Image: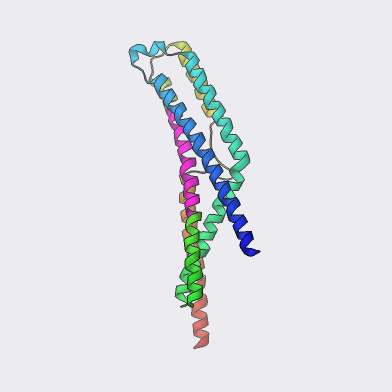
Amino acid sequence: MIAIGILRTSSCYSLFICYSTLTLMSINQRFSCVQQCTMTVLEVPKSSQGAVSCAAIRRIASAHDRLSDCIELLNNCYSIHIFYTVTMSVFFTILVVFQLIHAYATEANESMLGVAKNNIVYDQFHILVFIVMVVYTSLVGRNCHRISVMIHKSISYGSFDKRVLKELRCFSQQLQHHAPKINCGVLDFDWMLFYSVAGTFTTYLIILLQFDVGNLGFHRLHKS
């Protein structure tokens, strides 16, 4: 029964990772297409900038707005699950690394060392999941940032007519008020999360090792 429970949990966990990753890949691909279209429309020679279509800018802004709605829907549906996945991966990694160090420090028997090594191997899956989540959420954020930079540079340095500038300013306001960002309401899923998790991992692992070294020294002193 325990094996069946572990299998069901692992299967559900793997399925969630698959469809959430595929969703992020799909959103990122569409943002990349919007970025390419924006570049095609705006990065034209100065002699032709008066021919930029207002309708094309409105279509790009509409597509960007719909993709921002998709990100909000992703946050509402998956963000808590992603947050739980990231949290579980971090704490499981801390525990299995500490278990392996403790097993070597206490000169544990072969069975305990085997369990610790197997947990380290299994933990690679959790680490990979965490890195994949951070990479794809960061890619989405990077494409959104590039679109915003292109729009603001076009407003500041482009030689467009008044109607095109008006559409670009409306698009700029949309980017400010409806900025797409993948988060769970507590933290953003980006590379800053990766660095914070690395610091948390190091801090808690050092704390556990300090307590473990103190306990080992106390027991050895008591035995002697």
Q: Which residue does the image show at 43% across and 11% down from the upper left?
A: 161
Q: Quadrant of residue 152?
A: top left
Quarter of image, res 78: top right
Camera-side residue: 181 or 111?
A: 111
Seen in the picture, residue 123 relative to 83 is either above or below; the reply is below
Image location of residue 40, percent across then percent down? 40, 21
Residue 1: x percent and y percent? 66, 64
Range of magenta residues:
127-149
At x 56%, y 55%, the residue is 88
Closer to us: 15 or 62:
15
Q: Position of residue 174 (x, y in %)?
A: 54, 25
- Colour scheme shown: rainbow
Q: Is residue 188 visible?
A: no
Secondary structure character of the magenta stretch overall: helix
**For the point 60% across and 60% down, which residue is it?**
6
Residue 45's place in the image compared with 221, above or below, is: above
Residue furthest to the right: 1
The residue positioned 48% from the left and 31% from the top of the image is 31
Side of 150 where 67 appears, left or right: right
User: How many numbered marks, from 0 up?
Assistant: 0
- Residue 127 at least partly seen: yes
**Residue 214 percent location from the top left of the image:** 50, 75
Extreme residue toward the bottom, this view: 224
Q: Magenta stretch: residue 147 in it?
A: yes
Identify which residue, 157 or 42, lies in the foreground: 42
**210 versus 68 height, above or below:** below
Magenta-drawn stretch contains 167: no
